[in-house]
Amino acid sequence: MCGIAGFIDSRFTGDGQHLQALAKAMGHAIAHRGPDGSGEWIDADAGLALSHRRLAIVDLSSAGAQPMVSSDGRWIICYNGEVYNAEEIRRVPELAAVRWRGHSDTEVILESVAHRGLERTLDDINGMFAVALWDRTTRSLHLIRDRLGIKPLFLNVAEGRTYFASELKALHAADLSFEIDRASV
């Protein structure tokens, strides 16, 4: 299992050091989900931070490290899960020109989105996953779960900020607190 965490704060002003520290703290809170590596990716102008904890299974090399940037530089992904038909997607004609860096299903998702579009990629992938995908061109964050919601993705949206994580522990590390909605219980 891997772990993803991060946030986007549309009102953020400042440098990336604060974002980096908060992303690192969120990732550290879920370190048990991925002992094989960690990484952060920051876009201070957008108030965006992505954090990833890696459990290397499919591609053990550093080519599978995340957050991962697409070959065209437009897309950045943090991903937890498994795409069962990754090898099938890797062979579609639109991806024939891709110079693959490794063998991870993460890279397959990322390059498929870059070359075929997000909707087509999501229509074609079969698996269990939680994805944070940043589009540097449109400056939009896509948070995506598999159709059955097998992989967890917790969200907190308030006051121009969106936080997300594989576990609530990461949201607590961002100094977010929650109350039980007794009416819902």
Image (tube, helix red, strand yellow):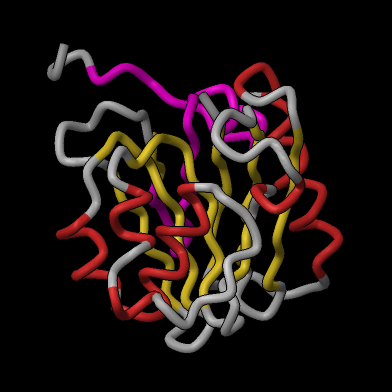
The picture quadrant where one finds residue 84 is: top left
In the rendered view of the protein, which quadrant contains the C terminus? top left
In the displayed structure, would residue 168 be above or below residue 4? above
In the displayed structure, would residue 180 be above or below residue 156? above
The picture quadrant where one finds residue 3 is: top right
Give the residues in magenta. 157-181
Is residue 173 found inside the magenta-colored segment of the image? yes
Front-most of residues 129 and 116: 116
Is residue 79 found inside the magenta-colored segment of the image? no
Front-most of residues 143 and 10: 143
- Across and down, in percent, residue 153 comes to 38, 36
- Across and down, in percent, residue 13 comes to 71, 75
- Across and down, in percent, residue 138 comes to 43, 86
Front-most of residues 36 and 78: 36
The residue that appears at 40% across and 59% down in the rendered structure is 109
Q: Most extreme residue toward the bottom, as rendered?
A: 137
Left/right placement of residue 167 relative to residue 34 reads: left
The residue that appears at 71% across and 47% down in the rendered structure is 23
Q: Most extreme residue toward the right, as rendered?
A: 17
The residue that appears at 46% across and 48% down in the rendered structure is 105
The residue that appears at 60% across and 21% down in the rendered structure is 33
| Count of numbered badges drawn on the protein | 0
